[in-house]
Amino acid sequence: MDTKGNILVIDDELGIREGCRRVLQPQGFAVETAATLQEGLRKVQEGHFDLVLLDVMMPDGRGIDLLGPIQERDADAVSVIITGYATVELAVEAIKRGAYDFISKPFTPDLLIMTVNQGLEKRRLSLEAKRLQTVEREAAELARAKGEMERLNEFKSAFMLVVAHELRSPVGGVQSLVRTLLRGFAGELNRQQEEILTRIEARLNFLLELINDLLVLAKSKTAEADKPLERVVLQPVIQQVVERFSDEASSEQVALEYHAPDAVLTVLATEDGLDKIFSNLISNAVKYTPQGGSVHIGVMEEDGRAKITVADTGIGIPKDALPQIWEEFFRAKNAHRAGITGTGLGLSIVKQYVDRFGGRISVQSKEGKGTTFTLTLSLDKTKRG
């Protein structure tokens, strides 16, 4: 049962003990009593009390000697001395040893209630101050940890940018040499040589795709993040991406459809960032859709926002993998089983840019049935001056 506070009354006079109980319990306090110092010490050590009313003169010693054990048990417990022999020396000693207040015998019920309420308010304020100090320390520690994480992320992005730049040139050079050999410019190849070089070229293509994705991801976290947002008309950017992947979709026998409203939809973003978003979403949709399937890109205005959907009839994403798809290098198990190559960075790149543009992206998918990504961006309806 909730109470206003747990009170312990330590006094050798039965009338004081029971009188305090009769006054305080109807006020909503839980009251326990002790008739000796030893009984009081035991209750202090075994129980939990917010406030202790402590007689200064007891048959087995001075009540003031219990102030230390009370504070050892709970540093914020409030001790009020009950005395009929108040002196300046006693007051000084009691205060030094941790007493909060004095109440002189005989005392009225109103004085007792007022003293107890004041003591408990002092305890509440003390506990609140400690809680706030703890919150401040935790906030400072979180700020320090956040700063350290940001510095590590900056270092990681800068390192990734340098490494990707350094790797792209030699990989591109080797790729050119392999293609030269495959085209027969360095002599005729037998079937086994051609098969080996074809596998090497596929590996190099994947490696170059990974390097390019690392560059895009690193730029989205470093230099690109500092690039100011601008007014960009949405439809032409998506149209260019659709045209870029139309040949690939056609060769894979995947129907690629795009529908957009006639009204001009302008958003605050960067053209390069939007290109990266839609290139990854449409590329994935085409890549993971089997022959005979379809990919549909729709654009509409809804509640003052541009809503873009990229829906496919592909292999889908398992339900247990959906929470992880935005993580770097994550790929669902069914994508591996299908033998479809990928870096696992595309959706991470998408999420970086969507967050930067203040947008939202969600996904609905059913394994074996297809996937729909829905992206919303705020429209910029300000007129150019």
Image (cartoon, helix red, strand yellow):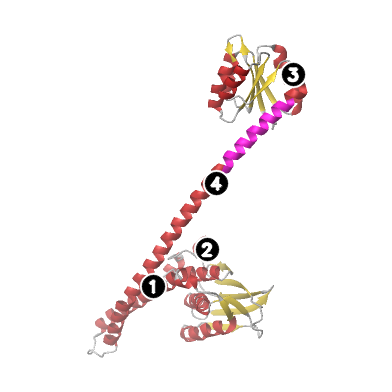
Identity of the amino acid at label 3? Phe
Q: Residue at x 55, y 80 (%)?
A: 294
Q: Which residue is mark 1?
A: 210
Cβ–Cβ under 8 Å for marks 4 and 1: no
Q: Quadrant of residue 176?
A: bottom left
Q: Is residue 120 magenta?
A: yes
Mark 1: few/some/many CA within 10 Å (<14, 14-19, 20+): many
Mark 4: few/some/many CA within 10 Å (<14, 14-19, 20+): few
The Cα atoms of the two marked residues, 2 and 1, are separated by 22 Å
- Left or right side of 65 for 13: right
Sequence-wise, the earlier of marks 2 and 4 is: 4
Q: Residue at x 75, y 23 (%)?
A: 111
- Left or right side of 171 for 292: right
Identity of the amino acid at label 4? Glu
Q: Residue at x 68, y 23 (%)?
A: 31
Span shown in magenta: 113-132
Q: Which residue is mark 3?
A: 107
Q: Secondary structure at mark 1?
A: helix
Q: Main secondary structure of the magenta part?
A: helix
Q: Which residue is mark 4?
A: 136
- Front-most of residues 235 and 342: 235
Cβ–Cβ under 8 Å for marks 3 and 1: no
Q: Which residue is mark 2?
A: 322
Q: Is residue 340 visible?
A: no
